[in-house]
Amino acid sequence: MKTYLALISTAVLALSACSQEPAQPAEASATASAASVVSSEAPAADTASETVAAAATDAACEVVVESTDQMTFNTKEIALNKACKEVKLTLKHTGTMPLSSMGHNVVISDSKDVDAVLADGAKALIDNNFVKPNDERVLAFTKLIGGGEEVSINIDTAKFTAGGNYEFYCTFPGHSGLMRGKVVVS
Ligand code: CO
């Protein structure tokens, strides 16, 4: 009987030891993470400046262009930084008019190709976003969007030369007179 009790008490001890085991690593890891929080406070300034630098890079690799029911873009210039492998361009249509009557896109080409891209785009009709399919003069383009819509593309900056003469414009017939600007590549 004493042996039996001893076994039970041993078992209880063993159980209690077991039940404490999960707590111990938790406490240990809590202590460890507390320690790591403390130790990470020292280089916090460096981390913050790295974050700022990363944010600046991200900003340079993203462009947002707004378009309106008044047949305008909100900017006359888009900057492409070749330090970015790709620049994400987002076109927003802040108006309410439908694509069929006030559709907008962003097409980018060398300045010398603008007239030809526009002429062939008009012939390509609305189902092709007024962009001739596989037009090699077109360096980047978004599809046409209507009021309330937005679209994003990734522009391959390897197609551009720093300091070159590039333009962006809407190829919806009749729009490029107002909807046209420079693409500045650095
Ligand atoms: Co347009």
Image: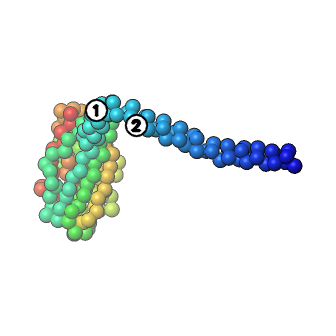
- Which dot marks residue 45? 1
Q: Would residue 120 be visible to someone looking at this image?
A: no
Q: Position of residue 57 (x, y in %)?
A: 27, 37
Q: Is mark 2 within 8 Å of ligand 1?
A: no
- Which dot marks residue 180? none
Residue type at mark 1 is: Ala
Image quarter (top left, top right, bottom left or bottom right) of the C terminus: top left
Distance in Å between CA atoms under marks 1 and 2 = 14 Å
- Snapshot colouring: rainbow
Q: Residue at x 71, y 44 (%)?
A: 13
Q: Is mark 1 within 8 Å of ligand 1?
A: no
Q: How many marks?
A: 2
Q: Residue at x 35, y 48 (%)?
A: 134
> Relative to the observer, which residue lies in front, 156 or 122?
156
Q: Residue at x 43, y 38 (%)?
A: 34
> Relative to the observer, which residue lies in front, 157 or 51?
51
177 lies left or right of 30: left
Quarter of the image for residue 80 reads top left
The answer to whether mark 1 and mark 2 are in CB contact below 8 A is no
- Which dot marks residue 37? 2
Q: Residue at x 24, y 47 (%)?
A: 63
- SS category of the residue bearing label 1: helix
Within-10-Å neighbours for mark 2: few <14, some 14–19, many 20+ = few
Q: Position of residue 155 (x, y in %)?
A: 31, 43
Residue type at mark 2 is: Val
> Relative to the observer, which residue lies in front, 181 or 131?
181
Q: Position of residue 108 (x, y in %)?
A: 24, 46
Within-10-Å neighbours for mark 1: few <14, some 14–19, many 20+ = few
Quarter of the image for residue 46 reads top left
4 lies left or right of 97: right
